[in-house]
Image: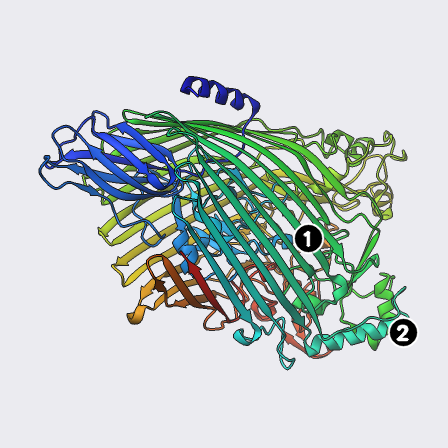
Amino acid sequence: MKPVRYLILQAVLIACGVAMAQSATGGLAGTVADATGARVPAAHIVLHASAVGLERRLQANARGEFRLSQLPPGAYELSVSAPGFATASANITVQVSTVRSVHVTLRPAAAHTTVNVSASASSITTASIDLTSAAHQGVVTAHDLATLPMAQRSFANIAYLVPGTEPVEPSDPTKARITAVSTGGSSGLNNSLTVDGAANSDDYIGGFLQNLPVDALQEFAFQSAGQNASVGGTTAGAVEITTKRGTDEWHGSAAVLERAAALNARFPIDNPAPNPKQPFSRQDYSASLGGPIARGKLWFFSALEYVPEQASIAYSPANQIQFQALAQLANDGLIPGVRSIPTPSSVSVPFHDFMADERLDWAQSSNSHWFLRLSADNYTTDNAFVQQGSLPSTGTTWHANYLNGVVSNTYTFSPNWVGSLAMAASYLHMTQLRNQHLGFALAFPFTSTSSTISGFETFGDNQFLTPITAFPVLRNQENYQFSYDMSHNRGAHATRFGVNFVHEPVLSGALSGTAETLTVFPMNPGAYVADPAQFAADLNCAPNASPGATCTATPAGNGSFSQNVQRLGLYGQDAWKLTPDLTLDYGLRYDTTFGLFLASGRTQADNPAYLTLKALQIPLVPGVPHDDHSHFAPRLGLIYAPGAQHRLVIRSGFGLYYDDLAQNGWVTAMQAVNSAPAPCVAASDPGCLPGAASGGSGALIDPNYKTPYALDATGGAAYALTPNWNLSADFTHEEGNHGYRAYNYNAGYTLFSPRFARTMAAQQANVPDITVFRSDNRSRYDALMLHLQGNLSRRLHFIANYTLSRANTWGCVLGELFDYVDGVCNPLNAFGPGDFGPSGEDVTHRLVLAGDTFAPGGFQLSALLQAESGRPLTLTTPVDVNGAGDAANDRAVINGVPTALDEFRGTPYIQLDLRLSRPFTLGERWHVYPSLDMFNVFNRNNPGSNYITNIAALPTPVNNLFNATALCQNAACTEAQPITSPKQLLAPAGALGDFFGPGTTVGIPFAAQLGLRISF
């Protein structure tokens, strides 16, 4: 096919639409000079990868400079020639999302020639200084994935090697095995992820969607700040993964990893003494194979991974006493419909995960290269959400099935014009099946004092202490993507532009729609056995119920939600080399979304809450929201690298980053329009919501919606102290605007209708409680990041990262940047005293050390050390302290002083993971790699910020939930210890974060793993 015809064909494809993804490619830039340092113009450049049939040719410009864009990551042979000079050649490696810099010195034809290439970039510990980008990023390679200790073999487990990142709970327990990564003080849900140029993000709650076989990953780049205009759909970090491909040489691997209870320390939270040590086994089987189907034309690469895990939870003696007391209450007929409650000593939590990846590469011609990749991730967790303080009835079975496919083509129109096409489709189907359907749940204080990746229910249906399940029982997501990028290199300019589109006809699911009642008890079952009458009163929230007892009834309803969303992105950028030492990288991106506020084909104008407010003449929400189409995002970077050797690089950047993820936060407003509304003109009409006294409540979205965005300003410098030592310092300042917040208005407290008497009884009889979702939050993140990298030949390769940071936002009991809907304590004073403070992921100090050392006898020791200061937490109370009628958003009052947002700090976190191995070589190509992994070597208890935050659940009760002044020393509180410091109320509840569990490398006790890997 002729290039012109091919260009016409691709232009037609562009008109059809394209995807929200950046291509997973790299680049090469260099200079050509003679022995005196004078530039050699018009030198001939040839870049060749014979194993995959790829070749690029071009000429250097008049200043002896050249640049090649959109190169698939991998190994290349570079050859440079010019009349009168000998040809110079070298082997180089190109990495994803990185432009590799080289300096070529040409000598007379009879002399030796050189290409100045820095240390082989096969690892994040040996990467060279980036001379072309202002982005803060790091590239983790296949070598790092194969040699560093990873507890769960998820690429995110070692993304923490990149400066500006930190571990964080996955936030969605349905994906607890896909570790999240925090950037910019946020929860990580606002990071974008692409694999081979195709998006792999969860568009409902955010975060990474699919796990991949580690053996399928070639490398990934994690950009934590300062991304250029090709990156969209994020207000924080961006991850670009590229997968392995076949070559003309057969290559593959097979591995098994084994972990058992005998190799693990006791986890005192999930398996406390004196219980017998719980059975545990986990295997990880993986295999890969790649090679030619037709040499020089067609190749394949396949990777499989299967993880069977048999875990369990053993109940502590103290919890078994409480379970038996609860069973006695049931035997006495005090729990309607339940006459017996089994109390096992332990519960098994099996997990099975199957991952597969298949890739075909085709060299259609020297100018045209295609690949097709198909991948799948299918996993099941039984008894999910069961924890140390909850019975099996609260568990569920999660089953997730994710399929993804991408077709990509790179076409070289000329030495200076390269186009890249990507078409992708993905499918997610996830279900949750409850262990029991009782229609109610009982929550006791002792349950919330244990490690948890779920809610706090003790017995009954899992409801996450909310009227309905906080996480969907059904998820479906279909995503069709199409993207096209064009690169042009000419003179001093390296230009790139693209158009991106995603069509998501299915973004749906369901929360529980069954009738449910949740009762939260202020005392444990053992106390109620001695006072069954009080149990009956608290169970029904009778007039003589105990303080802190709450009963929440949710009627049966339609829990489904459904959206059809389209996203369009356009961008252009240029790297303009103003001088040989100074580069200006500038660009502009435009993003917009269509259908963000449509659910089941209806707008918020059909929301009964909106209609009811109009009927009640309450001007709380004057209209309905519309898509925000004003997302123009400039990007600017300045890179200064003086001198011929470019040992020093000074860089700075500025940009705006938009991301409209909020579906999980405001799903209740979307559910409200599942069906056409009945008439609602007067308050008594059938389509209007009933008053709060009759359980009436609604949720809607404010009409003044603006898409959240981050304003980033970065600056820093990197210096090559020696050829083997690099040092860098970077500063990031981020201002967040239009973050999501939930305003809870309660009838008779903060919401009134002029149509009725301004009394509590009259208002609650006619006015419902209303939640309004607004985008008016603001936040700030500042960080200084230091990076040291050292390479001592074959003895030692290591990196050291230190980050000093602060992340602040507005919130109530939890503050997060961008990716959560933060609460408001008092909707009439939304930015009140004490409501601005650290985000939930604010870490003041963080240190990471990682690398390899080579000992005599061929032994290799790899290490990953993480240490950070304590994370913040907020103390809350279950009673209505501020008088807003919403006790769930009230912070604790201690000695008459209201506590502030995230006022307290948890325990500093320190964990060292090691891998000891002794590789063997058999023949020329076969390699045997036995290994011993040790996680949390010092078996340090790392509760992090997972402390008991509800003062009603403290193991030593406080004397007053409205104003705690003492700790009760006996049941009647006749003996009390005065509270002289709020820190007396801090009691660890589990591991590092609320959802830290089996899918993370943090918070776990010491665990050892034996492994054997064979590759060729």
Image location (x, y in percent) of residue 478: 64, 38
Q: Residues within 10 Å of mark 2 (few under 14, many from 20)?
A: some
Q: What residue type is disc 2 on?
A: Asp
Residue 637 higher or lower than 431, as above or below: above
Residue 529: x and y in percent read 83, 76
Q: Position of residue 570 (x, y in %)?
A: 49, 27
From the viewer's perspective, is the residue at label 2 or at label 1 nearer? 1
What colouring style does the render use?
rainbow
Q: In the image, what residue occupies the spot 25% across and 32% down?
A: 45
Dot 2: what SS? loop
Q: Could you tell me which secondary element the residue under label 1 belongs to?
A: strand
Mark number for residue 337?
none
Amino acid, disc 1: His
Residue displayed at 31% across by 53% down: 126
Badge 1 density bin: few <14, some 14–19, many ≥20, Cα 10 Å: some
On the question of residue 651 being in view, the answer is yes
Q: Nearer the viewer, residue 653 or 612?
A: 653
The residue at 78%/44% (across/down) is: 559
Residue 320, located in which quarter of the rendered image?
Answer: bottom right
Q: Which residue corresponds to mark 2?
A: 332
Q: CA distance from mark 2 to mark 1?
A: 37 Å
Left or right, residue 445 beside residue 50: right
The residue that disc 1 covers is: 399
Q: Residue at x 30, y 32 (%)?
A: 67
**What is the quadrant of the N terminus in the image?**
top left
Q: Earlier in the sequence, mark 2 or mark 1?
A: 2
Position of residue 292 relative to residue 57, above or below, is: below
Check the image and report above or below for 314 versus 638.
below
Q: Circles 2 and 1: CB distance less than 8 Å? A: no
